[in-house]
Image (cartoon, helix red, strand yellow):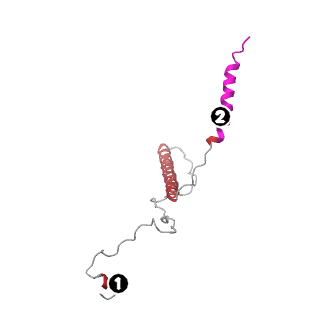
Amino acid sequence: MKMPILRPLFGAALCAALGLALLPAAQAKLPAPTPEAKAKADEAKAKTAWSDKVAAYQLCKSMDRVAARYAQEAKAVGKDAKPATATPACADPGPYQVAATAAPTPPLEAAGAHSPAKTATSPPSGKATSAEQTGTPKK
């Protein structure tokens, strides 16, 4: 007599075993983020925190408006409204300010072979001769 119920269970057990066997291979380590990526992530985190503060401020103001309107309408109808619960004042986070971060400095190279050229401070040509520029007499 065949047992048809064992076939699906065997297939599921085989898939689970293969999945567990391949799990360590799937856990690769990511490279360390670059300074630019870190700065961008920090900026995004700061902006998210600010927007959370703005949302909390807007919610606080909205709750204050609803409570004031409820009290006003209750008074107009003649109901006895309980006094509002004392809550801290809504704190306005103000406009978003970009965090002042120092520009990342590139690594110093030992030979300087790949360093960019210095910025020119004067035009490359002038009226002075080479001898006048170097301070040596003409021959």
Which residues are the magenta region? 1-24
In the rendered image, which quarter contains the C terminus?
A: bottom left
Q: Amino acid at mark 1?
A: Thr
Q: Viewed as shown, does residue 57 lie left or right of 18? A: left
Q: Residue reaching furthest right?
A: 1
Label disc, if present, on residue 8 of the rendered structure: none
Q: Viewed as shown, does residue 136 lie left or right of 38? A: left
Q: Residue at x 71, y 19 (%)?
A: 6
Q: Position of residue 4 (x, y in %)?
A: 69, 15
By secondary structure, the bulk of the magenta-drawn segment is best described as: helix
Q: Which residue is mark 1?
A: 134
Q: Amino acid at mark 2?
A: Gly
Q: Nearer the viewer, mark 2 or mark 1?
A: 1
Q: Toward the viewer: 105 or 129?
A: 129
Q: Where 22 falls versus 134 (above or below)? A: above
Q: Position of residue 122 (x, y in %)?
A: 32, 76
Label disc, if present, on residue 19 of the rendered structure: 2
In the rendered image, which quarter contains the N terminus?
A: top right
